[in-house]
């Protein structure tokens, strides 16, 4: 069952899958629904214990799927008993037939668990414009409900599409004197741009967290992580991030930052989201280099992030990095087009700790050799200082190579 989702070369930026322990109150299973002609599992089912809280963030793409529309409604209730993820078919732009397929899955799982359909969350990812085949979905769900428990790495592989490696993260926190565990998996490689969210991502914890507070924490964590990555500036129709808290760790429920351990839990959630967000960029379609854009001196943090994204989304900047060209003029261009406050005569640009330009001018003693050496690596830093204020932000992206074109030109085949 543990085969790569696609016949693609493993990203050179890949990181090993972490050792994620079993999360009390969450039982994952996988099966084959045969949504595509591939020899792999493509349907995931996670059953949650009674009393599990849920929070979620979803794409703002107005052509979103029925899964996203229903998920937005369900998450307001704050409870969950199951998650189903279909891979290979996004079920987006499929009208009433797409919605019927989702409702069928929800009803089938709800009947099995003797719960309300609204307790069953569904996500789908893959090709847009093809209705999810109901018979394959029904058979797949029937198979997964009887499947043995699997590992989180197997789940991470099963939810992938053009991903080249399994992506996971884990962290712990001490809450009310008890150690709680937070584990996350994510899929995403292309059609990645910050619009909350930017892929399919799931965080599961055994902590007891009230739904409203969990939603508040997920919103905050997502803003500085999932909303700060981009591969190609395109936002998907299906993007979803869900957080589930089973409450099986036995801690007193977290309802506000006044509760013992709330700060530690919030930090651990942010850490897991940051790890997952960066893993998506590391698997950017065709990526050879992981790029961190650090912006300082902006008029506000929000302005800094928009400037950082303008740099990170620039095809000229991304191709220059792919070609290991220290063309800092392209970074200047991207800053200037961002539509944010900037002063040419206060702007400074650097690479990997070496400043190429300061206060609007090339440095007289600028030595390009250390920058050229830095660009030959696969971990790249771009520094932008605007010299206007205290606003700062960090954004992550990857280079743009021929591989991105090859993958997307052949995607449906």
Image: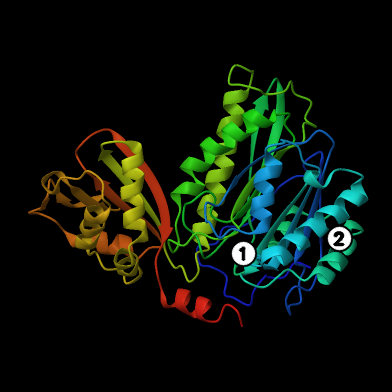
Q: Distance between the residues labelled 2 and 1?
A: 23 Å
Q: How is the image coloured?
A: rainbow
- Percent position of residue 275, x then y: 55, 47
Q: Residue at x 70, y 65 (%)?
A: 87
Q: In this view, does 65 lie above or below 261?
A: below
Numbered mark located on residue 78 in the image: none
Judged left or right of residue 365, residue 116 is right
Give whichever of 410, 365 is nearer the camera.
410
Residue 290: image quadrant is bottom left
Residue 8 visible in the shown view: yes
Residue with the mark numbered 2? 144
Q: Is residue 220 above or below residue 234?
A: above
Q: What element carries label 2?
A: helix
Residue with the mark numbered 1? 165
Residue 173: image quadrant is top right
Q: Residue at x 7, y 54 (%)?
A: 364
Give whichever of 88, 152 is nearer the camera.
88
- Percent position of residue 361, x then y: 10, 52
Give whichever of 381, 266 is nearer the camera.
266
- Percent position of residue 56, x then y: 63, 43
Judged left or right of residue 159, residue 400 is left
Judged left or right of residue 104, residue 225 is left
Residue 160 visible in the shown view: no
Label 2: few (<14), some (14–19) or many (≥20) C-alpha neighbours in 10 Å: many
- Percent position of residue 198, x then y: 53, 54
Q: Which of marks 2 and 1 is nearer the N terminus?
A: 2
């Amino acid at each position: 069952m543990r085969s790569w989702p696609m016949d693609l070369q493993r990203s050179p930026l890949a990181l090993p899958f972490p050792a994620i322990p079993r999360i009390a109150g969450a039982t994952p299973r996988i099966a084959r629904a045969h949504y595509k002609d591939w020899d792999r599992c493509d349907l995931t089912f996670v059953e949650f214990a009674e009393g599990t809280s849920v929070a979620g963030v979803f794409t703002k793409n107005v052509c979103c799927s029925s899964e996203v529309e229903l998920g937005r409604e369900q998450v307001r209730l704050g409870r969950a008993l199951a998650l189903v993820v279909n891979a290979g078919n996004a079920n987006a732009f499929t009208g009433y037939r797409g919605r019927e397929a989702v409702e069928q899955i929800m009803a089938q799982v709800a009947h099995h668990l003797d719960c309300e359909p609204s307790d069953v969350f569904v996500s789908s990812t893959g090709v847009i414009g093809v209705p999810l085949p109901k018979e394959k979905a029904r058979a797949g769900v029937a198979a997964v409900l009887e499947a043995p428990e699997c590992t989180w790495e197997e789940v991470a592989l099963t939810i992938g599409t053009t991903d080249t490696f399994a992506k996971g993260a884990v962290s712990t926190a001490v809450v009310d004197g008890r150690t709680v565990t937070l584990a996350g998996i994510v899929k995403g490689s292309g059609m990645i741009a910050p619009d909350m969210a930017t892929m399919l991502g799931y965080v599961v914890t055994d902590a007891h967290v009230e739904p409203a507070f969990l939603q508040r924490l997920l919103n905050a964590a997502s803003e500085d992580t999932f909303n700060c990555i981009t591969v190609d500036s395109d936002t998907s129709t299906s993007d979803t991030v869900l957080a589930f808290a089973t409450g099986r760790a036995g801690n007193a429920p977290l309802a506000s930052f006044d509760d013992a351990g709330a700060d530690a839990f919030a930090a651990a959630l942010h850490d897991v989201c940051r790890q997952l967000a960066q893993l998506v960029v590391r698997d950017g379609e065709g990526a050879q280099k992981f790029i961190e854009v650090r912006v300082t001196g902006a008029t506000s943090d929000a302005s800094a992030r928009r400037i950082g994204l303008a740099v990170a989304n620039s095809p000229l900047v991304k191709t220059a990095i792919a070609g290991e060209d220290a063309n800092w003029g392209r970074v200047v261009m991207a800053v200037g087009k961002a539509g944010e406050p900037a002063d040419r005569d206060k702007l400074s640009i650097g690479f990997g700790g070496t400043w190429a330009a300061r206060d609007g001018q090339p440095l007289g003693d600028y030595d390009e050799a250390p920058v050229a050496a830095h660009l030959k690596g696969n971990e790249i830093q771009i520094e932008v200082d605007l010299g206007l204020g205290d606003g700062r932000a960090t954004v992550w992206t990857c280079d743009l190579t021929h591989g991105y074109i090859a993958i997307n030109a052949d995607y449906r085949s």
